[in-house]
Image (cartoon, rainbow, N blue to C red):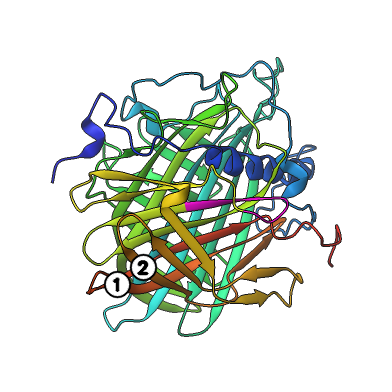
Amino acid sequence: MSDPFDERDAFSPAASRWIRWAAARIAVLVLFLVIGVVALLMVTEGPRWNPAGPVRARLSVASALSAPPAEGFARAEEPRAFVFPHDHGPHPEFRTEWWYWTGNLATASGRHFGFQLTFFRTALAPKAPPRESAWATNQVYMAHFALTDTRSERFRAWARTSRGALDLAGATTEPLRVWVGDWEARAEGPGPLPIRLRAGEEDVSLEVSLDSTKPPVLQGDHGLSRKGPEPGNASYYYSLTRMPVRGVLRVRGERLDVEGLAWMDREWSTSALGSDLAGWDWFALHLDDGRDLMFYQLRRKDGRAAPWSAGVLVDARGGTRPLAADDVRVEPRGTWRSQRTGIGYPSGWRLTDLRGGLRLEIEPRLADQELDVGARYWEGAVQAHGLEGTRTVLGTGYVELVGYDDRLPATKR
């Protein structure tokens, strides 16, 4: 299999209507940054670092959605040629970026697990402070790790935050590596693929190797994902939609060999979310015929779906068909309310590709896959079944639900 990262030019564009989606994720990263700064204050006075310590700041996602764009950072203003492997590494001239993996795994006997491992980088200022201290940095890193154990009906999630100094956290291009403490994504050889993900907390650990069977999907206009009509209100964004996974899980003392499929999102920008949006519902599915489907529905504060909702359907060979807001209908089929936080989320969906004829029923593997790691959101493993004409279609994937916590008190515990 050829390495898709060896290409030196941009691939053909995917959807032409990618509006505001990247801004939404960047806005929630601003929220994570606020929480992360609180955690960093705990380690500012010395080398003590407690990455496993819980962060109990309780901020709604909506409180961060209207953050104004920062001055002094680079802006995504026009399409650019993507250069790999360079663009897999950090872009510190931009304020925010992330490396985002989700996936479904199974043992040889069919026992199912879902995982999320995400690394966020945010710059506190455009330039590093002029200090001699080895602790000085303008970069903050945060990571989220979550595991769904379907058979045991158990979902667990953790977060870590640290500064980009003293090797506590960081990102490099060659070799490709992103880390917060001993949670890391690291290239296994001189090239960026295959890449090894490693994370562990308490009695759970993940160590898996990922490759890619399809080239990167450059979202929007040759990888420029616009957020609105203003110049620079955009991001650079690509995805690896189908990544075979193989490795080891350790759960409560049990060692399990697993394999499956993962999805990766990569994005960097300096921008903010429009004030009329409250959150989003994001769907990423691996279909059993080799296709991959992604669709995000942006929600306005009045509850209506925003017309900037969009997505993409990737065929088995990597070709793409954009999905506009009026191409797809998403219908929640039920609700679930967290006993831990009191937040209510949709649970179960019907997704219809009105132009292509694909109809899917999507169900969460577990109702409770809510992350309560400072910011509260639901992100979990799902399974899908449906029809395209008379042909049965099955799938697995992940769903992310953000912005359902606005009416909650600022603190819970």
Q: Which residue is located at x 44 percent, y 68 percent? A: 114
Q: Quadrant of residue 246?
A: bottom left
Q: Position of residue 198 (x, y in %)?
A: 44, 55
26 relative position to 329: left or right: right
220 relative position to 281: left or right: left
Local crowd size for mark 2, using a 10 Å CA cut-off: few (<14), some (14–19), many (≥20):
many
Instruction: Identify which residue, 247 or 282, lies in the foreground.
Output: 282
Q: Position of residue 141 (x, y in %)?
A: 60, 40
Q: Residue type at mark 1?
A: Leu
Instruction: Identify which residue, 48 or 87, lies in the foreground.
Output: 87
Q: Residue type at mark 2?
A: Arg
Q: Position of residue 13 (x, y in %)?
A: 32, 33
Which residue in the protein does label 2 denote? 359
Residue 168 in view (yes/no): no
Local crowd size for mark 1, using a 10 Å CA cut-off: few (<14), some (14–19), many (≥20):
some
Q: Mark 1 to mark 2: distance in Å? A: 5 Å
**Tag 2, which secondary structure?**
strand
Magenta highlight range: 296-304
Residue 302 in view (yes/no): yes
Quadrant that contains the C terminus:
bottom right
**Tag 1, which secondary structure?**
strand
Instruction: Identify which residue, 270 or 209, lies in the foreground.
Output: 270
Residue 194 in magenta? no
Which residue in the protein does label 1 denote? 387
